[in-house]
Amino acid sequence: MVKPAPRRDEAAEPSRKRRLATVAGYLSDSGTQEVDRLVYERIRLGILSALAVNDAMSFSELKKLLDTSDGNLSVHARKLEDAGYVRCKKRFEGRTPRSDYAITAKGRKALERYLDHMEAIIEATRGA
């Protein structure tokens, strides 16, 4: 004989609905809780994350770390630079050009906000 599934605690139901609404709010296309699409993309998230734990990294170091092409890294780094999330310092070593990247305070704040959003989504989803 199969036991019937236990009834959900009715008092817990509003909490579950709140968590699901939180997840929906973070995933929706409107509202102030929207995930920063600039940070969300894999290569840009990788750039910001790498720079958050290093004072600076060269273009070559980022390219190797993220296993991407010159063009792909260049496009994504430029978008982050245009948004003020990273700073690029160009110089020459002998005759070889070198680009060094560092995260800005604005970029660090955007990364932290993104990570907070992801943690909230994970917490709400696991609690559902």
Image (cartoon, grey):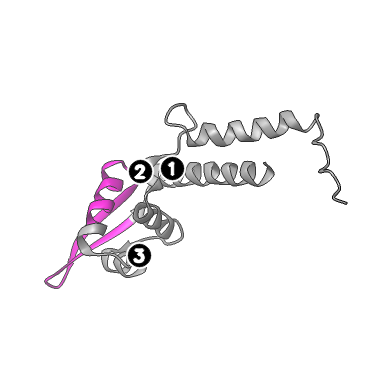
- Dot 3 lies on which element? helix
- Dot 2 lies on which element? helix
- Dot 1 lies on which element? helix
| Contact? badges 1 and 2 (CB < 8 Å) | yes
Residue situated in front as seen by the camera: 87 or 24: 24
Q: Label 1 belongs to which residue?
A: 110
In this picture, is 32 found above or below 39?
Answer: above
Could you tell me residue 105's position as x and y percent?
Answer: 41, 45
Badge 3 crowding class, 10 Å Cα cut-off, few under 14, some 14 to 19, many 20 or more, is some
Q: Label 3 belongs to which residue?
A: 66
Residue situated in front as seen by the camera: 41 or 102: 41
* Amino acid at the residue labelled 2: Leu
Name the residue at 65% across, 47% down.
Answer: 126
What whole-number distance in Å separates the C-alpha atoms at marks 2 and 3?
17 Å
What whole-number distance in Å separates the C-alpha atoms at marks 1 and 2?
9 Å
Residue span colored magenta: 74-101
Q: Left or right of 107: which side holds 124?
A: right
The answer to which quarter of the image holds residue 9 is top right
Q: Label 2 belongs to which residue?
A: 38
Q: Earlier in the sequence, mark 1 or mark 2?
A: 2
